[in-house]
Image (cartoon, rainbow, N blue to C red):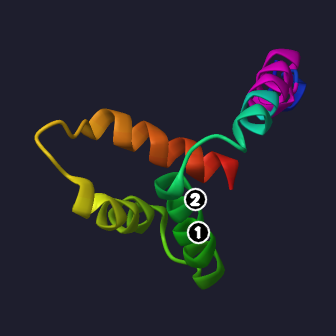
Amino acid sequence: ASVDDAPVRAHPGQSPEHQAFIEKETARLEARIDHGGALEAGVRAVFYILRLRGEADERHYRHASQLHRSELTSGFDPAAFRAMVREQALLL
């Protein structure tokens, strides 16, 4: 059998499982759009501006962390902050 005879592989994003995941994640995010406070709103605003300017994703976290610097204390949880930033980026 030649390479031309091989069955065509489905694109990963086209599987029913992936589509179900996308629909579930979209519904989860839509349900959370009105949650959060000033920090979450500020992070989304920064992401919106950076997206319009075409800056790279790595910069988003740095800008978001600058917003949060004034609140940094011994109780700061970097993992929770990263999760919040990631969720706000997805919401936007």
* Callout 1 touching callout 2 (CB < 8 Å): yes
Amino acid marked by disc 2: Ala
Which residue is at a point 40% across and 62% down the rendered structure image?
64
Foreground pick, 43 / 61: 43
Q: Is residue 54 visible?
A: yes
- Indicate the quadrant where residue 3 lies: top right
Q: Is residue 59 above or below residue 6?
A: below
- Indicate the quadrant where residue 83 lies: top left
Q: Quadrant of the C terminus?
A: bottom right
Foreground pick, 4 / 76: 76
- Indicate the quadrant where residue 34 lies: top right
Which residue is at a point 56% across and 66% down the rendered structure image?
47
Q: Main secondary structure of the magenta part?
A: helix
Q: Is residue 52 above or below residue 60?
A: below
Q: Which residue is mark 1?
A: 45
Foreground pick, 68 / 2: 68
Q: Which residue is mark 2?
A: 41
Q: Is residue 19 above or below residue 26?
A: above
Helix, strand or loop for disc 1: helix
Residue 24 tag number: none
Count neighbours of disc 2 (C-alpha within 10 A) and say few if under 14, some if 14 to 19, many if 20 or more: some
Residue 72 located within the stretch drawn in magenta: no
The span picked out in magenta is 8-25
Taking the image as shown, residue 26 lies to the left or right of residue 69, namely: right
Residue found at the very far left of the displayed protein: 74
